[in-house]
Amino acid sequence: MAEHERRLAEAQREHWQRTYGEHPGMYGEEPSEPAVHAAAVFRAAGARDVLELGAGHGRDALYLSREGFTVQATDFSPTGLEQLRAAARVKGVEERVTTAVHDVRDPLPLADDSVDAVFAHMLLCMALSTAELQALVAEVRRVLRPGGVFVYTVRHTGDAHYGAGTGHGDDIWEHGGFAVHFFSRALVDALADGWQLQEVHAFEEGGLPRRLWRVTQTVPPENGGERRT
């Protein structure tokens, strides 16, 4: 990691720690629309074990656990995960949710072929370089079983904040203290290389609104071919 990337990563880690501390449960208790969609996709695929990357204070992890999945929730903010664990106890789902403090720049702390599905809402569009994203997606594929499903969302280059604020290179722009890697369609396609790309769905969220893609891709089944759409 280059020095400027290391400084940006540390600044963002501190920013999110402070934000969760000052605004507990900042995203509310209702699940995101992508999480609701992901639950249906995972259920249709027969998934039981779900890994959520960038779970924050846990609204989506808690929803997935209530839907019957066993959830492993990771985030680089201990404060966010503390809030998640407290909410899981209140809602009586603590036996279905485990947490781990983890920076996705590091290898995932799971064995090969150990989960059925992975979910990440706006985690991949954090301040991660393209090389770090490629390494992360390779890790996601490593821990997914054959036929496993990966659903993630990212802000894209059609978003109103793309090109605004402080530029850090590699399509990463910082606005209001939050650094975002805005995705081009070419980047989505590159990260799907070797997967079966099922869907790239455009949607909007929030008051700006933020413009995002919801991407669904699967690990080809053993001895199966690849399909790109």
Image (tube, rainbow, N blue to C red):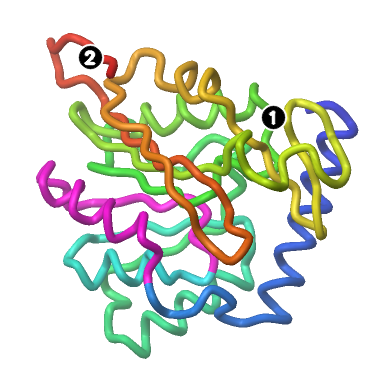
- Checking the image for residue 129, the label placed there is 1
In this rendered view, identify the residue nearer to me: 6 or 187: 187
Amino acid, disc 2: Arg
Quadrant (top left, top right, bottom left, bottom right) of the C terminus: top left
**Type of amino acid at the residue the image marks with label 1:** Ser
Q: Nearer the viewer, residue 162 or 72?
A: 162
Lateral position of residue 181 relative to residue 227, left or right:
right
Nearer to me, 43 or 110: 43
Q: Is residue 181 above or below residue 141?
A: below
Q: Residue at x 35, y 42 (%)?
A: 151
Classify 149 as above or below 77. above
Q: How far, Cα to Cα, is label 2 from label 1? A: 27 Å
For the record, the magenta segment spans 31-56
Numbered disc 1: secondary structure: loop
Question: Helix, strand, or loop for circle 2?
Answer: loop
**Residue 8 picture quarter:** top right
Nearest to the observer: residue 186 or residue 38: 186
Quarter holding residue 157? top right
Q: Where's the N terminus, which quadrant?
A: top right
Marks 2 & 1, CB-CB < 8 Å contact: no
Q: According to the image, label 2 marks what residue?
A: 227
Of discs 2 and 1, which sits in the foreground? 2
- Which residue is at 63% across, 43% downward? 159
Q: Position of residue 91 (x, y in %)?
A: 31, 86
Where 38 falls versus 116 (above or below)?
Answer: below
Q: Residues within 10 Å of mark 1 (few under 14, many from 20)?
A: many
Question: How many other residues sit within 10 Å of disc 2, few (<14), some (14-19) or many (≥20)?
Answer: few
